[in-house]
Amino acid sequence: MTQCEMVLAHLKEFGEITDLDAYREYAIRRLSAVIYNLRRDGYEIETKDTIAKNRYGKSVKFATYILKN
């Protein structure tokens, strides 16, 4: 399976993916590049800014990619 196929399958199953998900599950280090290719291929993927606390209690912002139906 290609990286695009893995990410697309994940999006179809779970609806969204983050960089951490992509790295942990598929060893993908440049998720934004994969998302770019999927968008180029016609998939509608929304980017949502997500804010969470890191292990030190600091707020961090990261992208969550959501497959639109």
Image (spheres, rainbow, N blue to C red):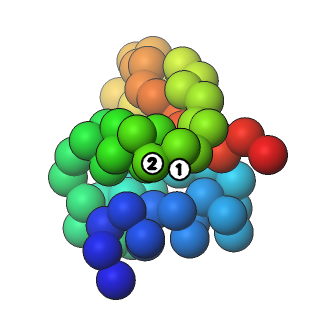
Does 53 sit left or right of 44 as displayed? Answer: left
- Residue at the limit of the structure toward the bottom, as seen here: 1
What residue does disc 2 label?
41
Figure label count = 2
60 lies above or below 15: above
The spot of residue 43 in percent (x, y) is 57, 45
Does 41 sit left or right of 29 as displayed? Answer: right
Label 2 neighbour load within 10 Å: few <14, some 14-19, many 20+: few
Residue 35 visible (yes or no) = no
Q: Which of marks 2 and 1 precedes in the sequence?
A: 1
What residue does disc 1 label?
17
Task: Name the residue at 56% across, 71% down.
Answer: 9
Label 1 neighbour load within 10 Å: few <14, some 14-19, many 20+: some
Does 66 sit left or right of 32 as displayed? Answer: right
Does 34 sit left or right of 60 as displayed? Answer: left
The spot of residue 37 in percent (x, y) is 34, 46
Task: Name the residue at 30% across, 74% down.
Answer: 2
